[in-house]
């Protein structure tokens, strides 16, 4: 699949979401951060807004659920039109069952790891997934500083994915910019979420292409 860029609308103007989606027409995915004020100390939006965005934009939606009890709530985001749905393993009761359910509904199934969550305990679960998300900030807010301490985990995740010959996208999210994306790509990430770097740029599509080219150089 190569390098994929998924701009996070968390850094966009929430009063004009459809227009903001239009500004990143060169993106592979539209990353939508769902926060419930419990799993993270911030509240954003839910399935009805995802449904409206899916209708308004031709870019597929990459839903990142930072919510408690994803076992209960995640399937509704597939029904709302998301092409991929990522839940956090720290919040899931039955991640295998949930990943299978997301796939059976027709979405790519993603599983996210907070910075303090190791990847090794989930080695046997990786074949159940389409996306492994390694957070490179503590989830909750855009515009935070990139955590270099997460890069060894990206490297270890890449080793596990290759060892099992899996077609699994390795996504990083948090503090990804022109300054940090090379380190992520070099560590083995292939899917990059970027919020403030893209929506803070004068020309978001040009920034997407610069990020893509910089990552491809190092991949
Ligand atoms: C943080 C979110 C990210 C956030 C990234 O909890 O999951 O997707 O929007 O924003 P930046 O790229 O600004 O760190
Ligand atoms: Zn996110």
Image: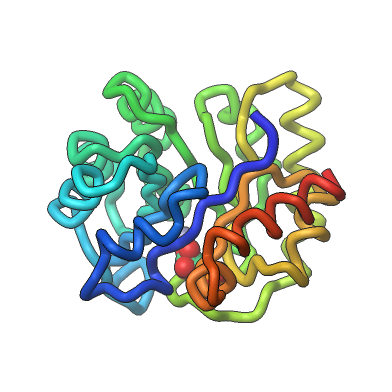
Nearer to the camera, 44 or 23: 23
Q: Residue furthest left?
A: 48
Nearer to the camera, 116 or 146: 146
Left or right: where 134 falls relative to 108:
right
Q: What residue sits 72% from the left and 46% below the top?
A: 189
To which quarter of the image does residue 157 belong? top right
To which quarter of the image does residue 214 belong? bottom right
Whether residue 103 is visible: yes
**Residue 126 x, y percent position in the rendering:** 60, 29
Q: Quarter of the image containing the N terminus?
A: top right
Q: Is residue 191 above or below residue 130?
A: below
Left or right: where 7 falls relative to 146:
left
**Residue 174 x, y percent position in the rendering:** 58, 67
Nearer to the camera, 35 or 180: 180
Q: Is residue 150 above or below residue 216?
A: below
Q: Quarter of the image containing the C terminus?
A: top right
Left or right: where 101 falls relative to 89:
left
Q: What residue sits 29% from the left and 63% below the top?
A: 19
**Residue 215 x, y percent position in the rendering:** 76, 51
Q: How many marks?
A: 0
Q: What residue sits 67% from the left and 22% below the top?
A: 166
**Residue 52 x, y percent position in the rendering:** 16, 51
To which quarter of the image does residue 140 belong? bottom left
Left or right: where 83 falls relative to 165:
left
Give the colour scheme of this rendering: rainbow
Q: Is residue 23 above or below residue 123?
A: below
Q: What residue sits 58% from the left and 50% below the top?
A: 5
Whether residue 138 is visible: no
Q: Is residue 59 above or below residue 42?
A: above
């Amino acid at each position: 699949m190569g390098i994929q860029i998924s701009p996070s609308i968390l850094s966009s103007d929430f009063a004009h979401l459809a227009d903001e989606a239009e500004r990143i027409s060169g993106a592979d995915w539209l990353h939508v951060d769902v926060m419930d004020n419990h799993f993270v100390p911030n509240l954003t939006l839910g399935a009805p807004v995802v449904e409206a965005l899916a209708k308004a934009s031709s870019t597929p939606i990459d839903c990142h659920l930072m919510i408690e009890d994803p076992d209960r709530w995640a399937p509704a985001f597939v029904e709302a039109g998301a092409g991929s749905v990522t839940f956090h393993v720290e919040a899931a009761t039955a991640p295998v069952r949930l990943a299978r359910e997301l796939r059976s509904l027709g979405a790519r199934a993603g599983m996210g790891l907070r910075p303090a969550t190791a990847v090794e305990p989930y080695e046997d679960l990786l074949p159940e997934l389409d996306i492994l998300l390694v957070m490179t900030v503590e989830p909750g807010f855009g515009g935070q500083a990139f955590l270099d301490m997460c890069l060894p985990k990206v490297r270890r995740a890449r080793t596990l994915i290759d060892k099992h010959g899996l077609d699994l996208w390795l996504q990083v999210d948090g503090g990804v910019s022109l300054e940090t994306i090379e380190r992520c790509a070099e560590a083995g990430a292939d899917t990059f979420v970027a919020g403030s770097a893209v929506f803070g740029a004068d020309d978001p599509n040009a920034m997407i292409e610069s990020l893509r080219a910089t990552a491809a150089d190092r991949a």
